[in-house]
Image (cartoon, helix red, strand yellow):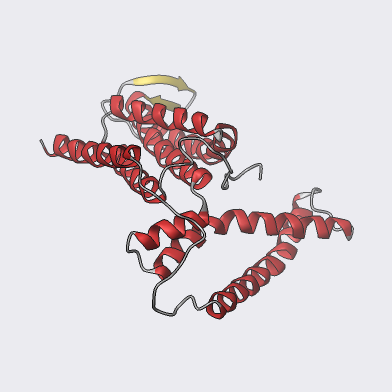
């Protein structure tokens, strides 16, 4: 998958963290990015980049993050840079357009928060094994159905992308033009949506029947292929994340 990050197998320290630790840190990163001052936000972004590098998923996370953040950056700079006057300080004036300093500062700061959201989410998806995540959430007391919905939602976009690529390849083999003019691309898109949506619905129904055949909704004790343990590093990271968020919240209130 070139454009979207999915789970990447690895044996790094990030991969070996308990799934509940990863969920906790994901929530802490999202809340922390929203609450943090610029210096702390920059530090958080640095930690996320280093963690992606240590996990060996930096290339895929970087490509996916750029595909999301670059359009957002252009839109934020255009909207806030040209229309948010603030104190009235001007950076550049080109003809009738004026780029305001306060608007650019606001756009950059808001983009930093969005970058933390995106990097944290992509790092989580890239290093959290879906089956281990499901097991960890169930052991933590999360209802199985709710845990399954959460795990399935993480796999939805990569799975739809893989399915779309297969459909496009099949259409090209039948001489359908998918790379020509705008009109041809629109026709190809319409031809893609039908099989994609129908295939997704059929796959969902098939998965639901398979789960029920295995007694997914039945009560009682369960066994798992995976044995998960909480290491001292897991406890330390959970404490650091929660204390950090509480500290930032207190700083905001004060």
Q: Residue at x 62, y 75 (%)?
A: 206
Quadrant in which the N terminus appears: top right
In the image, residue 227 above or below residue 138: above
Q: Nearer the viewer, residue 104 or 115?
A: 115
In the image, residue 245 above or below residue 134: above
Q: Residue at x 72, y 57 (%)?
A: 186
Splitting the image into 4 quarters, where does residue 35 fall? Answer: top left
Q: Nearer the viewer, residue 217 or 118?
A: 217
Could you tell whether 157 is left or right of 1 in the image? Answer: left
Residue 71 place in picture, x, y as percent: 53, 39
Q: Residue at x 36, y 68 (%)?
A: 143
Q: Nearer the viewer, residue 193 or 134?
A: 134
Residue 52 place in picture, x, y as percent: 49, 33
Give the residue at the far left of this rendering.
254
Q: Residue at x 56, y 59 (%)?
A: 156
Residue 89 place in picture, x, y as percent: 31, 21
Residue 127 place in picture, x, y as percent: 50, 43
């Amino acid at each position: 998958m070139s454009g979207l990050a999915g789970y990447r197998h690895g044996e790094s320290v990030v991969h070996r963290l308990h799934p509940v630790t990863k969920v906790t840190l994901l929530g802490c990163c999202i809340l922390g990015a929203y609450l943090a001052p610029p210096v702390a936000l920059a530090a958080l972004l640095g930690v996320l980049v280093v963690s992606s590098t240590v996990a060996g998923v930096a290339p895929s996370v970087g490509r996916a993050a750029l595909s999301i953040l670059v359009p957002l950056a252009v839109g934020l700079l255009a909207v806030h840079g040209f229309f948010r006057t603030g104190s009235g300080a001007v950076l550049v004036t080109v003809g009738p357009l004026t780029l305001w300093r306060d608007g650019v500062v606001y756009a950059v700061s808001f983009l930093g928060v969005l970058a933390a959201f995106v990097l944290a989410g992509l790092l989580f998806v890239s290093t959290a094994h879906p089956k281990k995540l499901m097991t960890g959430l169930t052991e933590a007391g999360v209802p199985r159905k709710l845990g399954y919905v959460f795990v399935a939602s993480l796999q939805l976009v990569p799975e739809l992308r893989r399915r779309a690529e297969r459909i496009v390849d099949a259409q090209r083999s039948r001489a359908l033009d998918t790379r020509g003019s705008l009109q041809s691309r629109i026709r190809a898109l319409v031809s893609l949506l039908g099989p994609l949506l129908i295939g997704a619905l059929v796959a969902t129904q098939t998965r639901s029947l398979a789960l029920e055949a295995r007694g997914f909704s039945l009560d009682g004790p369960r066994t798992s292929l995976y044995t998960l343990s909480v290491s001292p590093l897991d406890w330390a990271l959970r404490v650091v994340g929660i204390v950090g968020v509480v500290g930032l919240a207190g700083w905001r209130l004060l």
